[in-house]
Image: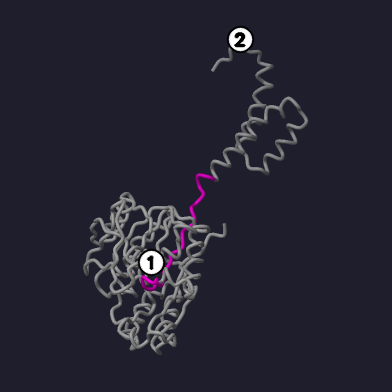
Amino acid sequence: MPIPAAVPRRLLFITLPILVIIVAFALAPSSSQLFARRIAGSFPFINSLFSPFKVFRNNSSTVSHISTAKMTKTPVYFFSHGGPNVQYETKHPVYPVLQAIGKEITQKVKPKAVVVFSAHWQSTPSEIHLNNAEKTDLIYDFYNFPPEYYQATFPSTGSPALASKIQHLLTTHGIPSRGLSRGLDHGVFSGFNVAFSPTQNPLTVPLVQVSLFDNEDPHAHYALGRAVSSLRDEGIVIICTGMTVHNLRDLRSAWGNPIPKPYVVSFDNALKEAVEAPPSEREERMAEVTKRTDARQAHPWMDHLMPLYIAAGAASDDLGKQTWTLHEGCMGWGQYRFGDVPSN
């Protein structure tokens, strides 16, 4: 391209090297910049030209850091939730434990939403149901308790958008599902009233409840958890509620006597070992627990055990840890967390 006569060739000879140095500074790694600064330092005019490019480079690094930053995967929790009386028995040993777990979730994990699986909602043997309504009433699914228990409240807001997303994940993993309007059962609101007290530690994010299968297949429930595991990458906490030992048949004989039945201790301990196994072995180890000779004593029906399998499936490759337990009468109160709590 011919050089216009209006541009003196001598001026062009001076400015071109300067432009090359400036562009190289803007694009070079820090080690090369040090050499460029030394050259520029000898020429104040050139040095002054570097300033805007320094700002550009710094801002580019900041933008790059923000755009590539990965959200920390949320932990998965299993609550042994107790009965509808748990929110009223403030002296029971589990009460401060659930309070502490709730504060960990709201103050450290800080979820964008919560998805909950409760032992008290089983749909069909092969189809999952989930609440896709924004507002629903509570379900008082218990009998012969004091009248005030049927006045319990728990403020929550559902999320049709999140429910739709969960259905999409289930479909992708070959699990049939159906959305409907259903209130929270006491497997959710009783324990949540302790963990997320509306006055002391309110849960202010959307809450969507999803059912279990109406079967006792540990692998099916593990796969159910695995299907929704990716929600954790979006800041959503998965909480599964049940009991690690739950034998209502023995409740009458155990009433008022906190000494645990032998099967409570043996089964709860075996379950802990399986849940805390390496993730590559965990599913099979947990499935074997359901075949133990004391399994039917610990769980005459395994509805309160299956939520733990969902939690383990949702944990993917994260380790499980029993954070607390209590052997009491015919009940086991194991609390579990899978994955790490954010340090900040």
Residue 70 in magenta stretch: yes
Q: Residue at x 39, y 77 (%)?
A: 244
* Structural crowding at the residue carrying mark 1, measured as other residues with C-alpha within 10 Å and reported as few (<14), some (14–19) or many (≥20): many
- What secondary structure prevails in the magenta region? loop
Residue 141: image quadrant is: bottom left
Q: Position of residue 239 (x, y in %)?
A: 40, 64
Q: Write down the residue under mark 1.
A: 190
Q: Is residue 299 above or below residue 180?
A: below
SS type, badge 1: helix
Q: Which of the two residues, 335 or 145, is positioned nearer the viewer here?
A: 145
* Part of the protein shown in magenta: 66-85
Q: Is residue 298 above or below residue 9?
A: below
Q: Position of residue 128 (x, y in %)?
A: 25, 63
Q: Which label belongs to residue 229? A: none
Q: Residue at x 34, y 71 (%)?
A: 146
Q: Write down the residue under mark 2.
A: 5
Q: Amino acid at mark 1?
A: Ser
> Is the residue under label 2 in contact with that under label 1 (CB below 8 Å)?
no
Q: Which of the two residues, 15 or 267, is positioned nearer the viewer here?
A: 267
The quadrant in which the C terminus is found is bottom right
* Structural crowding at the residue carrying mark 2, measured as other residues with C-alpha within 10 Å and reported as few (<14), some (14–19) or many (≥20): few
